[in-house]
Amino acid sequence: MAESVPVRCPSCRREHRFTAPSYPCVCGAPVAPRLDPDGTVTPVSHRVWQDDWVTVRCEHCGRSGEWPRPEVGCPCGTVLRVPVAEGRDGTGRNGSTDQDTTAAERTSDCADAPGGHAADRPPFRSVTIRTALDAVTAAALYLRRLGYRRVRRADQRPPSGIGLAARGVVALVDPAARPAPLRDVECLWLTAMTESADCLYFSLAGYADDARARAEALGIPLFLLDPTGTPRPVNAPAGTLDATGTENRAP
């Protein structure tokens, strides 16, 4: 059962009851960060990628993954970051050990090893998209389900959108309200070429006709993120990847 703690806004002094959200692990079990009832709630004044994520271990399979750090919006307009009990039971960005990470990687490698089939993967459990961070979370969850491991923020920042990366792949998450343009598709492809990696594109608003045509020619999988957070293949490469996972992708 998800934890619940009292949260008092330091700006207006309103008190809220906050329940930790749960996210689906690649094994299908729900994962939720452990909250620290004695910690200090902090207002979010500006966004830093490293501060938006926290490492949490799945109690069912032992995998450690990066999940959105808990936050709550106060009616006064302040966004509050809820403290997490970092370091307890191997959770928390600064609490996981090398031994924990190695064990999680071994488990993930066995579960996602080449040769599996889509039927062997658990059903995708989506995250409702309300913010750009939700879109990134949905894309990261989907990449993990496909078999890509250690999904992280891409080292090279894209011209627009948010870049994700894992071993052998780079992905672009585009939360803009306009269809993805040709330029962004081509920039993603060039980035993948320099990294000797595959690439995927996730868009909330679809794709311009010339962008979709170029992606088809280059073999770039295009996905549409619907409001429920479920990626929908919109071209043939995406349909193939969705059906087979990473086992038939080029090494």
Image (cartoon, rainbow, N blue to C red):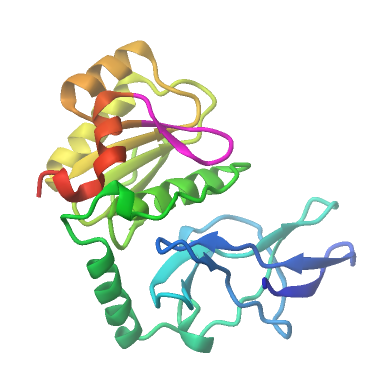
Q: As displayed, is residue 121 above or below residue 240?
A: below
Nearer-the-camera pick, 207 or 127 = 127
The residue furthest top is 209
Q: Nearer the viewer, residue 78 or 105?
A: 105
Q: Is residue 225 left or right of residue 112?
A: right
Magenta residues, as a range? 223-234
Image position of 239 (left or right of 113): right
Q: Which residue shows up at 32% across the image and 43% down it?
A: 171
Q: Is residue 100 above or below residue 190?
A: below
Is residue 17 rendered to the left or right of residue 84? right
Q: Quadrant of the N terminus?
A: bottom right
Residue 233 position within the rendered picture, expressed as x and y whole percent measured from the top left: 37, 30
Residue 132 falls within the magenta-colored stretch: no
Give the residue drawn at x 16%, y 56%: 114
Q: Residue at x 51, y 51 (%)?
A: 125
Determine the residue positioned at 59% across, 42% down.
129
Number of marks: 0
Residue 60, given in percent of the width and then of the height, sits at 46, 76
* Residue 92 seen by the camera: yes
Point out residue 143 in the picture as x, y percentages from the top left corner.
35, 50
**Visible in this render: residue 9?**
no
Q: Is residue 224 magenta?
A: yes
Percent of width and height locating residue 14? 90, 64
